[in-house]
Amino acid sequence: MFNQALAGSVPIQGTAVAARWDGLWDFLLGLSAFFFVLVVGAMIYFIIAYRHRPEKKTTYLTGSHLLEAVWIAVPTLLLMIIFGWGYSIYHSMTQAPADAYEVRVIGKQWLWTFQYDNGRTTVNEVFVPLNRPVKFVMTSEDVLHGFYIPNFRIKQDVVPGMYSSIWFQATVPGKHQVFCTEYCGTSHSGMLAKVIVLDDAQWKAWNLNRPIGNVPEVKYSGVEEVSAQSPVASAQGSLAEQGKAVYEKKGCVACHSVDGTTKVGPTHKGLFGSKVELADGRTVVADENYIRNHIENPQSSTVKGFNAVMPTFKGLISETEMNALIAYIKSLK
């Protein structure tokens, strides 16, 4: 394997999808090497075999339909193989399992904030379980950022005013480096974080707010050193409970119910994940981006059967409050 030959310069494979991407990388590198040798080798042979000689006259060539068909068919076939291979990996990366553990991520010049369902918030460190699907739902408070974990081979743009997501299933415990890969200002290179992958015992202890002990530092070539756990912020109720407080504080209860009854606005019970028919005839799925847009730009997504009377809350709700609010609405089954 080429990656084995380049050990030390290629990040370790911290997820199953990393191994799949590396397999495609090996194929592309091998294919490139093969055609490099073929083309350059043929060029050198032709230079020697068909060099100019006064006594030799070049034979007139009329072309070959078979040769033309081969050099069209072979590259086309190879390109389709590469496309199909890459698309299958990409598709699996974008379809998070239904039972994935969700973490809300907020990018801000120049740090990362992580919010958990249990109500905890951490900065520049995110704690996740080993061998379990984890989904990051991400947004930015200011400018465009890029969330990149080399060991996992995943990268996703983090865009202000909307939500993007990415998921993974870590297979190597320890601390994995996170970089911002979109130039976001003077301290762009210092916008670093760690994904801390915990085994079952550590994950259980972390959720109970107990010490988890030392966690290995996982670098490009493997586990190189051991560093102590950083302090973790205490939870102030679950994220959904925090969202309920925001829901009441911002006055959402005045126009929306949580038990299925209709008020001035539609009920929020069972809203998340459902199909919503809008006044302009469109039907949309009520995901994170729909809820956010309805809160910030309500006139653009008025629900059929209701009047466009909801005021905008843009600028009145922080990103942490927005994440909590959406978590609460998601909990209203």
Image: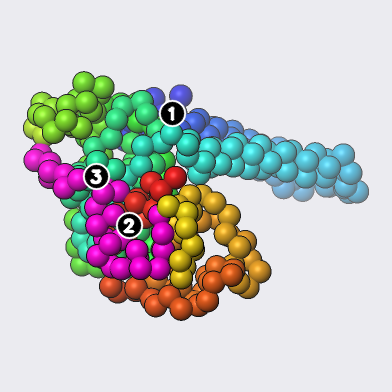
The amino acid beneath tag 1 is Ala
171 left or right of 238? right
Q: Which residue is mark 2?
A: 325
Q: Which mark is residue 16?
A: 1
Quarter of image, res 246: bottom left
Residue 43: x and y in percent read 65, 42
Please say if 114 is above or below 304: above
Viewer-proximal residue among 168 and 35: 168
The amino acid beneath tag 2 is Leu
In what element is the residue under mark 2? helix
Q: Residue at x 26, y 31 (%)?
A: 197
Q: Which residue is mark 3?
A: 238
Please say if 276 is above or below 34: below
CA distance separating discs 2 and 3: 12 Å
Asked if residue 48 lies in the magenta stretch, the reply is: no
Residue 74: x and y in percent read 74, 38
Q: Residue at x 36, y 25 (%)?
A: 131
